[in-house]
Every structure is written in structure tokens, then in C-alpha cells.
Image (spheres, grey):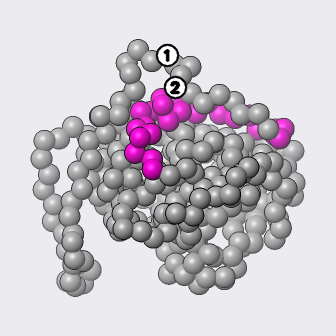
Amino acid sequence: MAGAGHGRTHPESGPEHSGPRLRAGTQPLWTGPSDGVQARVTGAGGGRLPDGLRVELVDPQGGAPLAGEPKAARTVAAAAGRPTAATQPEITSRAGWGADESLVADPPTYMTDTKAVFVHHTAGTNDYTCAESASVVRGIFLYHVQSEGWNDIGYHFLVDKCGTVFEGRAGGIDKPVQGAHTYGFNTDTSSISVLGNYNTATSTPAVRQAIAQVAAWKLGLYGINPSGTVVLAAAADNGKLTAGQKATLGRISGHRDGFPTECPGDNLYADLSALRTLASAANTSGTDGTSTATATPTWRPECPTPTR
């Protein structure tokens, strides 16, 4: 796996906002089995390339789950909490896709709410098999942590082209963990990233159903109707909005709605309306969903969030 991609995504505050380990980079590119790399890098308009430019090579095979591991150990148990019409989908746990937890230096940062879900694509290739999906997720995790210096993988959930859902950032799938996915809007939001490039690929019914089910369940924990909208203020200048500027966003939005990027690709972005409809049908007990306020959260951290 090497780099190629679509923009700044680390948090606006907290331990991953700045530090000596952080390094700017592209999105990772899945190559499959390979024994060499050749890269050509050009600056926009023939301009100067950044100092310290390098190609990062990541081998995701080192974290492969044990071949004999039972399926039950690879999925996340259904979380208890506020009743919601949408049931929790089957989610492959971090242990199931082989996360190396020793690489995660700090505990997760917790927020107080989840007001919206941002949909992403990982860009890169669509030429992986679904049997290779766990390896692709490991590669993204290793790239975020080892190459870009983040504490953990940036996304909360990942979905492959067969509709398999993977647990992303650690801390509890039913808890408001701060991610690193949409710079300016990482607070009080969640994220789902689909493996592949959806500027060129089109989503399958399985992909759309998986996204809708995760979003309906996650927002349903807060009594939120996925078809509604919410007013959020940007937490940082991000090239699309200035810090403090308010934006009316769908409860299910695309990365490009909050940040200047092509993500989640034209084809997946065009699916957002259908995704909201699917998610709303799965969770019909939510509120109207259009507000500038937040629903009462079902969980808060018991201890202060670490700041280092």
C-alpha cells in the first residue's frame, strides 16, 4: 500500500491536532501483492514539490487475524443503550480484521453527541477481492498511524464493496468517539468510508444497504431521523468554510459537503439521497431530524479527556 488521495482529515483539536509525529500525506493506495514500486510525482502547474517527500510502503499482512479464530470473536457484539428502530448491523471487530492495538499510543477522545454521519470513499483501487478487504483496512490503519502519525485509523466504520462493515477507530462503536475524517467537522460526528474509488465505480445495493443501516443505527442512538438536517459550525478554517462559519448539513452528508474534496466520489455522492431514504426507513422512531440543537446524548465519558 502506498499513498494517493484527497485532503486533510486530522482532528481540529486534541492530541492528534499537532505534534512531532504528524505528517501530511495523501490517501493510501492499495496495490495488492507486489515486490516493487515506481512513482512519478509532479507539482500542480509544474510547481515546487514539498520538502521531505517520500513514498510510504505498508505491509498489512503482519496483522492478519489468526486463521483458526472463531467468527464470534471477529464481530462486535450488539451494544446495549437507547432503544432504536434500526438494529445494529453485523460489524467485523478490530480483532477480526487484525488491528495491532500496540500501535495505538493514546486512549480515544470522547465527544458528547453524534449529530451527523459523513460518507467517504478511500479512493485508490477497486480491484481488491472481498477476501482481501480486511487486509485493505489494516493497510489504511497502518498508513494513518505509522506514516501520518495519527493515534488510530481516522474513520469510525469502513464498508467493502460486498457490504461487509468493519469497526474503525477504537473506543466503542456505540460511543461518541472523535474521529479524523472531515477537517472542521470531526466533533460530534461519525463517519463511514467505503473501500474503493467511487468517481469510477458505482455502489452496489449491498454497499448502500450497509451504509444506510450503520447510519440509521448510529443516529438512532440519539433519536435522530437520518433524513433530516442539522446546523453545524466549522471548528477550523478548512478551505471551504472558515472557523465558526455555520453550515446546514444533512444528517447523512458527503465529505465534500464540509471540506473541499472530491470525496466520496461523484457516484457515491449521487447516492446520498437514496441512502437517507433507506436509513430513514430503517429508523422510523427518530425525531423530525431538522434542528440547530442536539439530542440528549446517551453516554458521556466518566473521566476527563486526555489532552496530550
In this view of the protein, can residue 272 be seen by the observer?
A: no
Front in this rendered view, residue 225 or 281: 225
| Looking at the image, residue 208 lies above or below residue 117 | above
Q: Residue drawn at (16%, 60%), measured in percent from left and top? A: 39
Chain part drawn in magenta: 82-105
Marks 1,2: beta carbons within 8 A: yes
Which image quadrant for residue 110?
bottom right
Q: Is residue 248 left or right of residue 165?
A: right
Q: Secondary structure beneath disc 1?
A: loop
Q: Amino acid at mark 2?
A: Arg
What residue sits right under mark 2 in the picture? 74
Q: Position of residue 46 (x, y in %)?
A: 20, 83
In this view of the protein, can residue 109 be seen by the observer?
A: yes
Q: Assess whether residue 96 is covered by the magenta stretch.
A: yes
Q: Position of residue 8 (x, y in %)?
A: 44, 69
What residue sits right under mark 1 in the picture? 70
